[in-house]
Amino acid sequence: MADKKLVEAITSMDEDFAQWYTDVVKKAELIDYSNVKGCMVIKPAGYAIWELIQRQLDDMFKAAGVENVYMPMFIPEGLLQKEKDHVEGFAPEVAWVTHGGLNPLQERMCVRPTSETLFCDFYKGDIQSYRDLPRVYNQWCSVVRWEKETRPFLRSREFLWQEGHTAHATAEEAQERTEQMLDIYAEFCEKVLAIPVVKGRKTEKEKFAGAEATYTIEALMHDGKALQSGTSHNFGDGFAKAFDIQFTDKDNKLKYVHQTSWGMSTRIIGAIIMVHGDNSGLVLPPKVAPTQVMIIPIQQKKEGVLEKAYELKDRLSNFRVKVDDSDKSPGWKFSEQEMRGIPIRVEIGPKDIEAGKCVICRRDNGEKVEAALDELEHAVAEILEDIQSNLFRKAKTHLESHIYVAKAKDEFVKLFAEKSGFVKAMWCGEQECEEKIKEDMSVTSRCMPYEQECLSDTCVYCGKPAKKMVYWGKAY
Ligand SMILES: [Zn+2]
């Protein structure tokens, strides 16, 4: 009985997906709640996932010519207000600093909700000539947005992220960079996180405050809801004009720079949980699993068992591997390994040692195989790779089987009433119509995908001539 307790304590995902999610983040020890309202404590098991995300994404950035910097965390009010759309977009959710020690500040400052204004202020002085371009900077930091409702990883008042901010000599170069960074996010999600995504452009209504165009990658969670997983914005020269960022070009003329920004946050950990998790808990893709292999000794008090377990650990030093030598029962240890999403567990007991083998159990599908101890390194490497690709395949099948097509309004309404997932449908391009859809059905446009199709000639909701095919969905 005791062995099952850990697992029994989580709600089934089909019964109550939201509760299942909360149970998993707590039981897998990813986060804890804090006395700081709306903020979370990221525990070692959660933070280690973030570190693996950070390391691998940062490597991809560096390969694309990105340099890391660090900006102040405060933004004076006057600076925030320089770009009109931007301040309007963020004003409702910024936190203000009004005092320095005991003295009221002459000008209040907000805690950065995002750093466009700081980068612009910096670039204004830093960029003089075409020789100073491009600037391709990124910072890893936390930002603050005063959310009313919060959920671990998905929405919290302070969260960790990276924000890239670039400045270019031409509009073409800025557009190229915007798309390049979106491609990097998509590749990162698919190759590292095993999460398939839909790439596209946001509508005017859903684009970033102050941007000319916003591009997004959208992932589909197990419950059929969408999660915006990374965005890349082309600012054109709008911010440059508001902040007066000009450079002398080769032709000796003074010109405004063209800018981009792009970000991915700890929200993506929520996506990993909701795409791959199951009723036994977390399922981590090997590339972001802080522990990839857990060795669990069976009858560990018997002579030679623990020694053998440590010996195997040493042999597997190319992987992130641990031995669970605690005094808990093997059954309890199995449940814990499953709850924490550790991709592989290796069971080793006296009989196995005698026979020169061990049992390898996969977290993704529960399959157990025997492996000769001599071949363990090879077997583990192969299985980890297979888990990584199997998780992607599974998620891709789930995504593809939850994309529906609606050609008429009744079909559209019926699909969202009965199914969960993305619905592809034609749209007139008018914001009013989009707002009506949101109001009536709590459905938002997720993106206008790169790969456009013509499903019908008229807008699915209002019947006016169709302009774009849109992925619609309910979203986190
Ligand atoms: Zn319409």
Image (tube, rainbow, N blue to C red):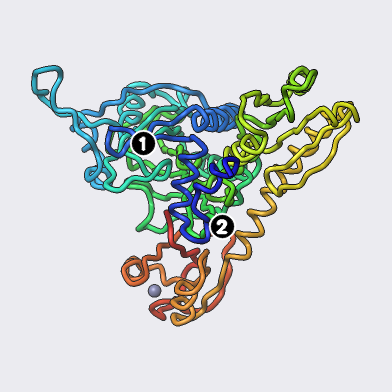
Judged left or right of residue 246, residue 93 is left
Quadrant in the picture for the N terminus: top right
Front-most of 145 and 138? 145
Q: Residue 27: where, in percent of width, then height?
A: 49, 39
Q: In front: mark 1 or mark 2? A: 1
Q: Secondary structure at mark 1?
A: strand
Look at the image and tell me whether residue 256 can be seen: no
> How many C-alpha atoms fall within 10 Å of the one at disc 1: few (<14), some, or many (≥20)?
some
Q: Residue at x 37, y 41 (%)?
A: 237
Check whether the beta carbons of the residues at disc 1 and disc 2 lie within 8 A of each other: no
Front-most of 146 and 277? 277
Q: Residue 260: where, in percent of width, then height?
A: 43, 39
**What residue is pinned by disc 1?**
33
Q: Secondary structure at mark 2?
A: loop
Q: Would you identify the image quadrant in which residue 56 lies?
A: top right
Q: Amino acid at mark 2?
A: Tyr
> How many C-alpha atoms fall within 10 Å of the one at disc 2: few (<14), some, or many (≥20)?
few
Residue 450 - label: 2
Q: Amino acid at mark 1?
A: Tyr
Q: CA distance from mark 1 to mark 2?
A: 39 Å
Q: Would you identify the image quadrant in which residue 159 lies?
A: top left
Q: Is residue 101 above or below residue 204?
A: above
Q: Residue at x 37, y 35 (%)?
A: 40
Q: Is residue 35 above or below residue 99?
A: below
